Image (cartoon, grey):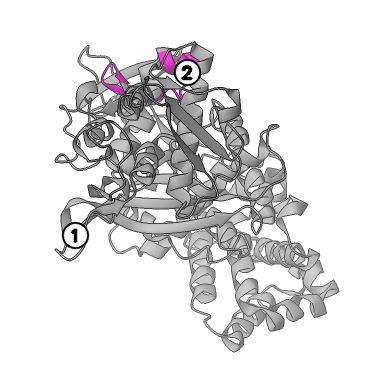
Amino acid sequence: MGRLEAELTWSLSDPGMGLLERAGLAALYMSLRAAEERQVDLSPLQWDESDLAVDSVTIRSGADLESAIARLFEWAWQVTEGVLYLPAVHRDHKARDNAFLRVPTHNGIMRTFLQHPRVQPKGDLAQHVVQLDEDCHVAFAFQPVEPSRLKPITDLERSRFFTKEGAPSDEEVSLSGWVFPGIAPRYGREVAWKGPPSMGMLLMLAPITCLYQQLHNQRGTWLYVVPDVRDLEEFDAIRVSPSFGLDPTYTDVASLGDAGLRFLAEYTSHPARREIGGGCRVVAMGKVGYYQSQSIRKGVVDVDIATARTAIRRYKILHATMRNRWTKRKAETDSAKGQKPKSPKPKDENGTTASHFVAVPTARGRIADNLAEGRPWYSDLGCPLAWDREALDRQRKNRPGVSIERLWFNNFLYQRGRLMELIDQEEMWDSPAERLFVEAFWQILASLYRREADAVERGGSRTFGDRVEDLNEDIRRRLTRAKTRPLLREAIADLFAKPVRKYRSPAVREHPAAMWRLIDDDWKRARDLGLLALASYQSKENRDKAGDDDTTSPQQEGVEE
């Protein structure tokens, strides 16, 4: 009598299927699809077309399931050139043949799910410099791993997933904390994950389909984006797109909201997407002072497609306006001027040096977080994000006596042209009164600047640049310190009354009711609009050149250099 055929079935609607479990089921589905495309024999694992449904996956084996699952994991988790190769998501031939395109995924998994050396042993740091363009060389660093020692594979061998006969076990299995990164046991009372073997297998596959990015201003803090998978076929068609993670400029983000909305913007723009719900969860992991032995969770953000449709549309405009870009390193320009570079340029073992790094616009993180939280995109422009304070502290060392808030706001000035582009987009506004307020504020600023120019012509002791800088700082302080409606009304009224009659703002003169109604109805919004106008102001002759400004702020140069 022959051995009976054994099978396992998972469904997206099974009890206990959370975000990570559904992501693991998507990884299983995609790994099997990748094997079909490559015509790879995964015997004794068996399945047919009907086993890969939009909401479920079935696998079977004529032998024992233990051997079949082991073969599946060997296929799903691979290493080439010391870098992870995951056939489920690395389906493009460029990703298979160019290890540097897989480095972001490799580093992300090694800094989140498999971060701890006791969990996943790693080799010494390797650095390679790759030529992306004729004069653009970029450095990629990673810690290589050995294929035979990958944690998902060794856990499958050591844990009691199967009986002695190779059938799935009926008892709970225990996995080390890597399956829920960032909340591993630390205080003695917490225990490793325990649950049915079928769920454990999905959790061990889940890292494959997550997306990995790093906070630009906090090197060492990595994010993993867990998709809310509702349709396996649809997700497979979209996730394998080269736009997800294979572009080296994609890796750096400015905030958690930036990462989540970027994922959803790419996802909802794909032609294969149908009108169903979904979303994602973004988890940030990094070092903290009170617990330095490993990275822990430093932030979690959930973004839902259904409730963030307007945010996603606006983020697409934001991302098109404020993209990452390759920027020549400061050390390179210093050398060209005959100056000693502040820090050596990265180079690989062959002596090839990196000439460029990725620059991320300072403003995008704050705006993206505002959109993800359902707030106006210009909210709290004067308040730096927690993720940016470390870089601002480094920048402040070069400008003693200058507050972090002032440095943060000054960095926004590097994107004034791009802020102007956002202001010109009707989709970014909830009402015409908001744009009217900004335009009126611009007119007031123009009047005040002309008054300062007149003072210089009369023989003032200070230059026009110094006078404008002091004026802008005075306006910024007055607006940020206005914490109540009466204080803001006082600050705005004083500001609008300063210009002499010939410099008065037409917008203020023609629409006073609309201006004061906005201040009375939502004074915080009016304050933030004033700060937006201050950060984005350009003279009329320069407004036609919006978008030509430099997105590289001193804050970013400090990070890279």
Q: What is the x, y in percent for residue 211?
A: 45, 39
Image quadrant in which the C terminus is located = top left
Residue type of the residue flagged with mark 2? Ala
Magenta region: 79-96
- In the foreground, 220 or 501: 220
Residue drawn at 55 percent across, 55 percent down: 303
Q: Earlier in the sequence, mark 1 or mark 2?
A: 2
Return the residue at label 1. 289
Question: Residue 123 appears in which quarter of the rendering?
Answer: top left
Residue drawn at 49 percent across, 20 percent down: 34
Question: Residue 492 appears in which quarter of the rendering?
Answer: bottom right
Element carrying mark 2 = helix
Compute the Cα span from label 1 to label 2: 45 Å
**Is residue 80 on the magenta stretch?**
yes
Query: Visible in this render: residue 250?
Result: no
Is residue 220 depicted above or below 164 in this figure? below
Is residue 481 depicted above or below 307 in this figure? below
Query: Visible in this render: residue 341?
Result: yes
Image quadrant in which the N terminus is located = top left
Query: In the displayed structure, does residue 190 sit left or right of residue 556?
Result: left
Residue type of the residue flagged with mark 1? Gly
Residue drawn at 72 percent across, 49 percent down: 540
Q: What is the x, y in percent for residue 345?
A: 26, 26
Q: Residue furthest bottom?
A: 486
